[in-house]
Image (cartoon, rainbow, N blue to C red):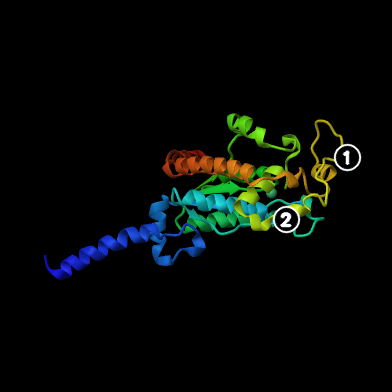
Amino acid sequence: MKPATIFLMLSLVLKAPAAGQNLPSRWDELVASDWPLALAKSESTCILPIGILEKHGPHAAIGCDMIHVREWAARVTAKEYAVVFPDYFYGQIYEAKHQPGAFALPSRLVWDLLDATCEEIARNGLKKILIVNGHGGNPHLLRYFVQSQLERRRDYVVYLYDPPLDTAFYKKAVKMWKSDPNGDMHAGESETSTLLYLRPDLVKLDRARQESGANLNRLSLPDLYTGIWWYADFPNHYAGEGEKATKELGELLTEHSITSLLRALRVVKADRKTKQLQNEFFDRVLK
Ligand SMILES: [Zn+2]
């Protein structure tokens, strides 16, 4: 074999795995010349982690929800490749507007921005968009958004990662809670624990008792829903006892979430049926 041929073969062998191994998941860290490789390796799948900017008690970082889903996406895609959209902080958070740091865009803008973001992701060839939400104020918005995908024909599918409560896991995990799990909702023991596990530098645990995260129960309207319910119960935008957080609980909850998300990502990557049914549906929609 000629030395030139050996050199060519060697360089090809060295180049191929290196390109695969070093391919970043984050959209903003990819180089354009690697885009086709990213499309192929991801099976045209993009994770869209959605967080929010809102107060998390007096002690946990304002971007807590984004930090969680960003970390989940990073850890999951290290095992199963997908492109990850950069930080997306725009969702429903009007109930925290009385507190510092809340970033609450007009509702129509929130909707249009999300729709336009999905359109742009798909225009770039990523035809499966997996929304991973970290913010408790978003599910109503996101379920309606996903349902509204049937409003007009699209050449892409939006999936919402929306796992039901894993009761078997929860039954075991709940033994680790030091506070009342029913009152542990926002910046309380579990959320502070997971942030403590992921980013201990962003938790000021000694400040967690500066405010109360107790439910004030100021409004009693059985069978009725109002937008002010959360403020009525938790005007400090804090629900639970963050000071009881531990890294151990954070690790248990986070690793469980990562395993579950990894499973969902693999399902999305392998899924051909949803797009097929979506196309069939639009073919039948009366013009
Ligand atoms: Zn949160």
Q: Residue reaching furthest left? A: 1
User: Closer to the camera: disc 1 or disc 2?
Assistant: 2
210 lies left or right of 19: right
Q: Quadrant of the image for the N terminus?
A: bottom left
Instruction: Identify the residue under disc 2.
Output: 204
Report whether the residue tagged 2 is closer than 8 Å to ligand 1. no
Q: Residue 165 sits in which quadrant?
A: top right
Give the Cα distance between marks 1 and 2: 29 Å
Which three-letter amino acid code belongs to the residue tagged 2? Answer: Lys
Task: Confirm whether residue 128 shows in the render.
Answer: no
The label shown at residue 84 is none
Name the residue: 45% across, 42% down. 266
261 w.r.t. 74: above or below: above
136 lies left or right of 253: right
Q: Residue 213 sits in which quadrant?
A: top right
Sequence-wise, which precedes: disc 1 or disc 2? 2
Instruction: Identify the residue under disc 1.
Output: 218
Q: Residues within 10 Å of mark 2 (few under 14, many from 20)?
A: some
The picture places residue 228, in percent across and down from the top left corner, at: 82, 44
Pick the residue in front: 212 or 76: 212
Task: Confirm whether residue 91 shows in the render.
Answer: yes
Name the residue: 47% across, 57% down. 25
Circle 2 SS class: loop
Circle 1 SS class: loop
Name the residue: 79% across, 43% down. 230
The picture places residue 177, in percent across and down from the top left corner, at: 69, 37
Which three-letter amino acid code belongs to the residue tagged 1? Answer: Arg
257 lies left or right of 203: left
Q: Residue reaching furthest right? A: 218
